[in-house]
Amino acid sequence: QHTCTRVGNTLVMLGGEFYAYSGADFSQISVFDTELLKWREDAPPLGFQRSGHDTADLGDRLVVTCGWENKEVVESVLLVTKDTLAVSEIPVMQDAPDARAQHSAVAVD
């Protein structure tokens, strides 16, 4: 229910769920350093509870799409900067696809 994306020598884990279909979604960013083999303790919170979402690597940002937020399917799109892990929400346009969870997304050059 979470995503894990490689960013340089780290793995960035976003959101997730306490246990399957509990509705207890995590609102955290966790970062694992693959060289030091330890979790960073300074990662900021995601700011949004999210599970069942997808994350795509897009240059200097990660794009987090849709998912669950407390048992509700959401259509929001979040941007997470790779260097600071700052999170911002992109306004959803009127012609956006319907909200969804348990989906896939991929960045294509």
Image (spheres, rainbow, N blue to C red):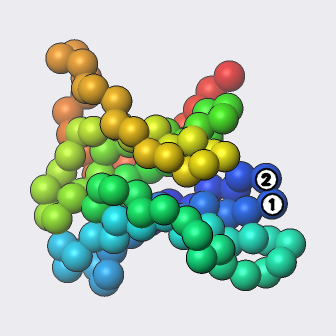
Residue 26 at what x, y percent from top left?
33, 70
Give the CA separation, mark 1 to mark 2.
4 Å
The answer to whether 97 is drawn above or below residue 7 in the figure is above
Q: Can you see residue 26?
A: yes
Amino acid type of the residue tagged 1 in the rendering: Asn
Residue located farthest toward the left when viewing the structure as drawn: 72
Mark 1 residue element:
loop
Q: Residue at x 50, y 46 (%)?
A: 86
Label 2: how many Cα within 10 Å (few below 14, some 14–19, many 20+): few
Contact between labelled residues 2 and 1, with CB atoms less than 8 Å apart? yes
The answer to whether 81 is drawn above or below residue 48 in the figure is above
Q: Which residue is mark 2?
A: 8
In this rendering, would 67 be left or right of 1? left
The answer to whether 45 is drawn above or below residue 105 in the figure is below
Q: Residue at x 40, y 58 (%)?
A: 46
Query: Which of 29 and 102 lies nearest the eye of the viewer?
Result: 29
Q: Quadrant of residue 62?
A: top right
Q: Residue at x 86, y 72 (%)?
A: 35
Query: Which of 54 and 81 lies nearest the eye of the viewer?
Result: 81
Mark 2 residue element:
loop
Residue 31 at what x, y percent from top left?
62, 68
Amino acid type of the residue tagged 2 in the rendering: Gly
Q: Can you see residue 104?
A: no
Quadrant of the drawing holding the N terminus: bottom left
Query: Which of 25 and 19 lies nearest the eye of the viewer?
Result: 25
Label 1: how many Cα within 10 Å (few below 14, some 14–19, many 20+): few
Q: Which residue is mark 1?
A: 9
Quadrant of the drawing holding the C terminus: top right
